[in-house]
Amino acid sequence: MKFVNINSKNIPLLKKRVKAIEKDFVPFRKKRKNNPLEDYLVKDNLHMILVSDKNNFIAYISYDDKYKKGGYIRGIWVDKRYRGKGLATKLYRKAINNLKKKNIKQIIVRTWEKNAPSRLVIEKLGFRKYRTIKNDRIDGDNTVWFKLFL
């Protein structure tokens, strides 16, 4: 497996897999206006790490290093065929280490209340729940926010 920081050269690889990623996410009730993929090419506070295996895009983590006095894990996704193998934990650790290098003191992440595997990884890494937004997803699920103090 290969871990790659995103840049303009590998955006086509990411776009190719976006439809697969979108199938795994339950949308928010509010529509989003921005195009997050292009944001990673033009905004210096946004970062993304891609994981490929034999030229296939299999995972990513995205994060912001200037979010409300800290860092923010914006998203993480692992292809279904690679789940349960520790890849999400590795990606979180890489993002956390990158944020530590920038002297970030706290990191925020969110997930769905019903997403037990995601919550397990987040809590295992030391994040603590601090906020719940009720009925935030189209399917009625809640969004749960976590913080990690470094």
Image (spheres, rainbow, N blue to C red):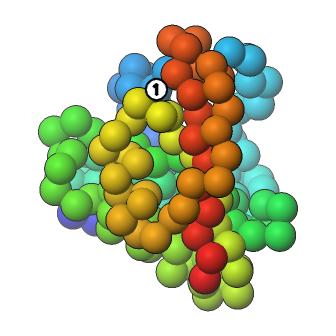
Q: Secondary structure at mark 1?
A: loop
- Judge by depth and name the residue closer to the eye, 52 or 133: 133
Residue reaching furthest right?
68
Say which residue appears at 31% left-offset and 44% top-offset: 117
Q: Which quadrant is the C terminus positioned in?
A: bottom right
Determine crowd level at label 1: few under 14, some 14-19, many 20+ residues with C-alpha closer than 10 A. Answer: few
Instruction: Say which residue appears at 61% left-offset and 48% top-offset.
Output: 145
Image coordinates for residue 10, horizontal then vertical, percent:
47, 51
**Left or right placement of residue 117 versus residue 8 in this view:** left
Identify which amino acid the numbered label 1 is placed on.
Phe
Residue ID at (78%, 61%) = 67
90 and 57: which one is in front? 90
The front one of 16 and 110 is: 110
Q: Is residue 4 left or right of residue 141?
A: left
Quadrant in which residue 69 is drawn: bottom right
Residue 101's place in the image compared with 64, above or below, is below
User: Which residue matches tag 1?
Assistant: 25
**For this rendering, which residue is in front, 28 or 115?**
115
* Residue drawn at 27 percent across, 39 percent down: 79
Quadrant in the picture for the N terminus: bottom left
Give residue 134's position: percent from left, percent from top: 65, 26
